[in-house]
Amino acid sequence: MEYTGSSYDGDHKNGRMEGKGKYEFPTETKYEGDMKDGMFHGKGTLFFPNGSKYDASWENGIAIEGKYTFADGLRYEEENWEYCDGYDRRFYTEICNGLKPAGRSQLTNRVPPRDIPEGCYDCGDGFYNPDTRVVVDYNQKFLRNADDDEDEWIRRTCRKGWDEIVGIKGEYLSQQHDVVDTCMNVMDG
């Protein structure tokens, strides 16, 4: 176990993990449930660091059937999946708690949304710094270097840690600023 960075607390039989137990991976994903001959076998649940979980029936280390539950409590359903289906784009928390009043946008499913460091993007599993092209998790631990495709996707689609005025309002404000400058010059001069 010490070679893989994993740990196990539970029953043993003939020197192997067997019976009820808790197995923790080096990624902090945890399994709690039945073991047989060193493998997940029977009923057991994988708990992921982000708060989601997978309840399953296992045979010799392979999930035979199971249910995935997201960190916010939303259960994935293969049949009749209606969440984020193209027609209804509400966040799950909006489905459960209702929409916010006009003018108050909900930017993420997390309430309140994470504060994004200045100059970075929230790319779903952590923060992306476009200057270094490094993605770190929400605890500032290194995850990966972004390639060109991921860099382009993040810049195009993810929330930014800064405000900027874009579109017609930005052009309008720029024009108004020019008008004010012209008026000030006329008054000064």
Image (cartoon, rainbow, N blue to C red):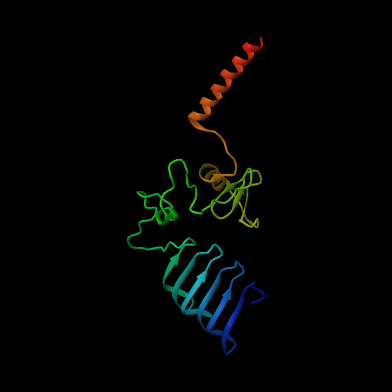
Give the residue at x 45% y 65%. 69
- As drawn, the residue found furthest toward the top would be 189
Q: Is residue 146 above or below residue 44?
A: above
Q: Position of residue 172 (x, y in %)?
A: 51, 25
Relative depth, front residue between 119 and 155: 119
Q: Residue at x 44, y 55 (%)?
A: 93
Quadrant of image for the C terminus: top right
In this view, the residue in front, 103 or 160, is 103
Q: Residue at image x 50%, y 44%?
A: 157
- Residue at the image position 63 percent from the left and 12 percent from the top: 187
Q: Is residue 168 above or below residue 159?
A: above
Decide if residue 119 is on the left or right side of residue 67. Answer: right
Across the whole image, how many numbered discs are drawn on residues?
0
**Outermost bottom residue:** 14
Q: Position of residue 47 (x, y in %)?
A: 52, 69
Position in image of residue 135 (x %, y %): 61, 52
